[in-house]
Each structure stands twice: as C-alpha cells, then as structure tokens.
Amino acid sequence: MIGTQVNENTKRIRDRIQRKAANCGRNPLSVKLVAVSKKKPSPLIREAISAGLDVFGENYIKEAIEKIQELKEESISWHFIGHLQSNKAKQAVLHFDLIHSVDSLRLARELDIQAGKISKIQNILVQVNISKEATKSGIQTEDTIDLIRNMAKLDHISVRGLMTMPPFFDDPERARPFFKDLKKLSDRIVQENIPGIHMDELSMGMTGDFEAAIEEGATLVRIGTAIFGERL
C-alpha cells in the first residue's frame, strides 16, 4: 500500500510541477524534483525509485551514508541539503553529487581540501539566509557576493547556484518575496562575471510552497512530505 501511495504521490507532484512550469512559460524539464528522504528507510526510497525518482536529498551524514551504501546499485543522485559541519566535509565529498548548504568560506575551504584528495570537483550551492532568521543557517544576502568571490579561488569547488529556506507560512504567497529576492541575488551575481562561478541552480521551494518557487525561478524543489507522507 505504501509503495502505491508513493507512486501516486510522485505522479501528482510531477504533474503539478509540469503544469506550473508550463503556465509561467518555463520548460518543465528546467525544474528538478529532489525527493527529501531524511528519516525514510531504504525500502521506501526504493519505492520512490520505482516511481521514477532519481535525485534524493538527505540532511544527516551518518544516516545518509547507510542508505547510500544500501542503495549503491541504483542509478540515482544524492544531494546533501542539511546543515553541514566542517568536520563532516570528507564524508560529504565522498558521497554527494551536490551540496546545497555551503554558507561559509571555512566550510568551502575544507570541502576544497577533501575534494582535492580524491581529485574531485565538488559541486555546491551557497545557502543564503534571505529571511535573516537567527535560527536559520546561511550567509547574509549582503555578504554573499564577497563569499562567492573567495570561493571562486578554490580549485576543487564549483559554485552552481544558490539555496534558501524561507520562513514557514501556511500561505505560500507569503514565501514568494523570499524566492523573488534569491532570484534577484542570483541575477546580480551573474552580472558580476566572476570567473568559474555558475548560477544555473536555484534550490528553493518545499511541499507547501514549491509552486510559488517555480514561478520565481526555482530549478530544484525539495519535497519530502508530499511524496513520502509524514515522518515515520
């Protein structure tokens, strides 16, 4: 029954993504669904893979590594979307294709060192605290461009875009200004023409507000509850 639910939920979310992208004049293929699989067991992730999902987002290194190893035969991509401590950089580089949550030069330098050891270019997003909430991680908006200029000097890091988490609202329209501000910041960074820096990705939008995020330019939407149900 759970597998059927995951399949039905996935189809429903994909339909909503495609419809919203098309309605605002975007190619639906420009929006990638990241299935947030934290606290979800490997059998449930297998059901999601059977439903056609191939990108999974994890928040906790230890839990993620166990699942990555259990599912190593699957052709899927793993993204790290939680707060990352510098002492976990080695494991993050070993296991994740994209890290969404890099918010300091210290962390970027450690990722650069660890990626260099295995001759890897680690793709990252810069997490921006657009809402300036004290409880949220992320670089402040006004400090982002300077941070990215310094990241550009690192040989084994590739900045691919930005990520943010707006405050939680019951009304997704209240989240829209934060998505709009992240897109404006991305556009400003593009205008800076910083060598080696790419602004291809905007990771923003979750179960309750992803359609507003798509309208404002999201390329990666992070959705867990609407696919897997409430946390087990």
Image: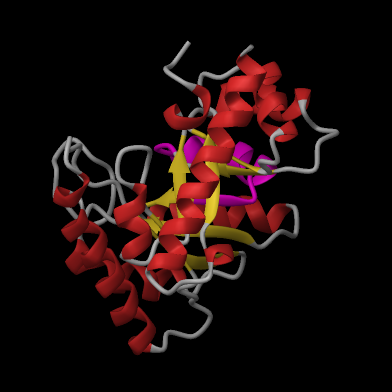
Residue 80 placement, left or right of 135? right
Toward the viewer: 10 or 190? 10
Residue at the right extreme, as displayed: 73
**Residue 60 x %, y %:** 50, 28
Looking at the image, residue 156 lies above or below residue 223: below
Colouring convention used in this rendered image of the protein: secondary structure
Residue 226, position as x, y percentages in the image: 44, 31
Expressed as whole percent of the image width and height from the top left, the position of residue 81 reads: 46, 41
Instruction: Using the rendered view, name the quadrant where residue 188 is placed.
Output: bottom left
The percent coordinates of residue 76 (x first, y second) are 73, 43
Q: Which residues are magenta?
A: 82-99
Residue depicted at 42% across the width and 84% down the height: 194
Residue in front for this viewpoint, 12 or 103: 12
Quadrant location, the N terminus: top right
Report whether 216 appears left or right of 172: right
Q: Residue shown at 54%/47% (left/top)?
A: 14
